[in-house]
Image (cartoon, rainbow, N blue to C red):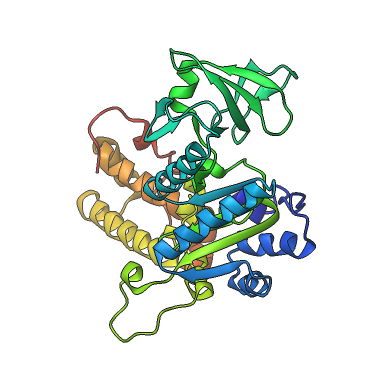
Amino acid sequence: FRLLANDGVAAELTGVWRFINAWERQASLGLRDRDANVLDQYQQHDRLRGGSREEMLDIAHRSWVHAREHGVSTVIMAADHATVDTLAMRMRASRVEAHQVEPAGIEVADQTIGAGDEIVTLRNDRRLVTTNQHWVRNGDRWRVERRTGRGALRVVSLDGRGRVHLPAGYCEEHIALAYAVTLHKAQGMTVDRGIVLADETTSELGLYVGMTRGRDANHALVVTDAGELEHRRGEQLPMAKEVLARVLDQDTAERSATETLRDTLGPESYARLSAQLDHVLAEVGRYAGRDPGDQEMWLDDHEQIRRLCDVIGTALDDHFGRRDRRHAETGLPRWPGPEPKPPVMMLDTGPDPW
């Protein structure tokens, strides 16, 4: 979709509806575009904080507890499962101690989920319909009312969507504690306040997801201590904004085959292809003579060489245009004989001609 939007084929999504604060709507678009300048706005609104990993974990937990006491829905996010599981079970333990959640429960991955727990569903399933006629969606948040001995859960929506029975097969793979989730699983979630734990290993895509889950506010707790970032002794530790600027400087987005070809087949690549074609045609001329008819007969007897010429010639034609324009405008050699065939090598089931 990004490729289509950049080529003017499709419209780009621009409307932002989730955030209450107008400045955050615009800032979120800056994060999407990897513009590090928007970090100044987040810092001015006290949305960034840095320190050691332990300090950030403690702040995340305290923020979660404070939010619950004031009825504010909150999710803590991190890139790795180890951090998420540590936080989620720490938060669950505090709820067990307060007699809000049963100690036991079903085991899902490295988490325990029981009655009273808040969970998030991670897969759309239109077959699971609530009492209010809503189907279960990825990112929906629920409270567990009870569990069965076979691993199924009866849950009620935290967003007023009714109750539903989640079968054991769904629960085994597609739920998680909602107190803390990975940035990947957070896609689709909407809460009052989002808090993301970030460091230099966080991707720019993950940071964008983490900083766009909350309606009221989104905060980044950034690991900046030397132990985590392996800075040399005596070197000044970076600020939270500096770490996030490095994160935004990355480009980890997956690319389509078309976009990848555009990036890799630059002018130098076509120059190499042209040189290869010159070499191949010179070899053809050396063995078959300069007469185009003789060359065609020789190529008919050497199918692999013809395929090689077809592949190189087609790539050059796609870049420079048809053969006459290529010869007139670039000085590249004319194609010997008739127009080249499509590169059937890609469909051939025999030995690789290369």
Q: How many marks?
A: 0
Q: Quadrant of the C terminus?
A: top left
Question: Is 89 situated left or right of 68 in this image?
Answer: left
Image-quadrant location for residue 281: bottom left
**Residue 3 x, y percent position in the rendering:** 59, 51
Question: Is 10 situated left or right of 243 in this image?
Answer: right
**Residue 109 x, y percent position in the rendering:** 38, 32
User: From where the camera sits, is residue 164 visible?
Assistant: yes
**Residue 277 x, y percent position in the rendering:** 33, 56
Image-quadrant location for residue 123: top right
- Outermost bottom residue: 234
Name the residue rendered at 59%, 32% in the picture: 138
Q: Nearer the viewer, residue 293 or 254?
A: 254
> Please, is residue 124 above or below residue 42 in the view?
above
Image-quadrant location for residue 89: top left
User: From where the camera sits, is residue 153 visible?
Assistant: no
Q: Nearer the viewer, residue 115 or 174?
A: 115
**Residue 226 x, y percent position in the rendering:** 34, 74
Question: Is 312 situated left or right of 258 in this image?
Answer: left
Question: Is 244 situated left or right of 236 in this image?
Answer: right
Name the residue rendered at 34%, 67% in the picture: 228
- Outermost front residue: 98
- Outermost left residue: 287
> Please, is residue 341 above or below residue 238 in the view?
above
Name the residue rendered at 58%, 71% in the picture: 36
Q: Nearer the viewer, residue 41 or 334?
A: 41
